[in-house]
Image (spheres, helix red, strand yellow):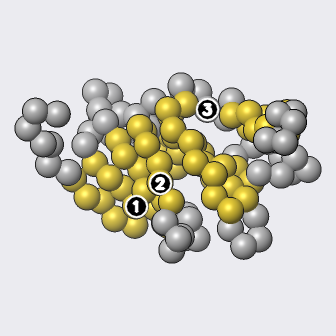
Amino acid sequence: MVLGFFLQDFSHKQSLKGHEHKITAIVVVDNDNQSLCISGDSGSGIFVWCVDPSLSNEPLNKWYESNDWIYRGVHCLAVSGTGYLYTGSRDKSIKAWSLEVKMLIQFALLISIQGL
């Protein structure tokens, strides 16, 4: 569950439900017409919600990275100004997702740096 709060008085704004695994990363995006909350979990799930208490608390979209059981899990999220979501995963990869097309658009495998 993701909880949203007003920063002015720290009052509860919205509860977003849907993850079955531990949430490991979260990012909020302010688009022209709506705010989105995007979260990743330890089961390789990526969930997208509209941040608006008047709407459903269910995700707008659910994506799942295809990882094996050893390397699954989303560890970080970043959003570009051009409409792409980037996910960093335990399998040492960065994946780019189109927020407009709502799909994985490319895959890049990172080479591990010795000593890290």
Residue 69, image x, y percentages? 32, 28
Residue 1 lies, with reference to residue 107, above or below; the image says: above
> What residue does disc 3 label?
19
Q: Nearer the viewer, residue 79 or 21?
A: 79
> What residue does disc 1 label?
96
Camera-nearest label, 2 or 3: 2
Examine the image and state in which quarter residue 108 appears: bottom left
The residue under the point 26% across, 39% down is 91
The residue under the point 53% across, 71% down is 81
Which quadrant holds the N terminus? top right
Q: What label sits on residue 74 in the rendered view?
A: none
Q: Secondary structure at mark 3?
A: loop
- Mark 2 nearby-residue class (10 Å; few <14, some 14–19, many ≥20): some
Camera-nearest label, 2 or 1: 2
Examine the image and state in which quarter residue 47 appears: top right
- Mark 1 nearby-residue class (10 Å; few <14, some 14–19, many ≥20): many
Residue 101, image x, y percentages? 55, 70
> What residue does disc 2 label?
78
Seen as rendered, the residue at the extreme left is 114
First reached walking from the N terminus: tag 2 or tag 1: 2
The residue under the point 51% across, 38% down is 25
Q: Amino acid at mark 2?
A: Ala
Side of 15 relative to 115 (left or right): right
User: What whole-number distance in Å separates the C-alpha atoms at marks 2 and 1?
Assistant: 10 Å
Residue 61, image x, y percentages? 63, 52
First reached walking from the N terminus: tag 2 or tag 3: 3
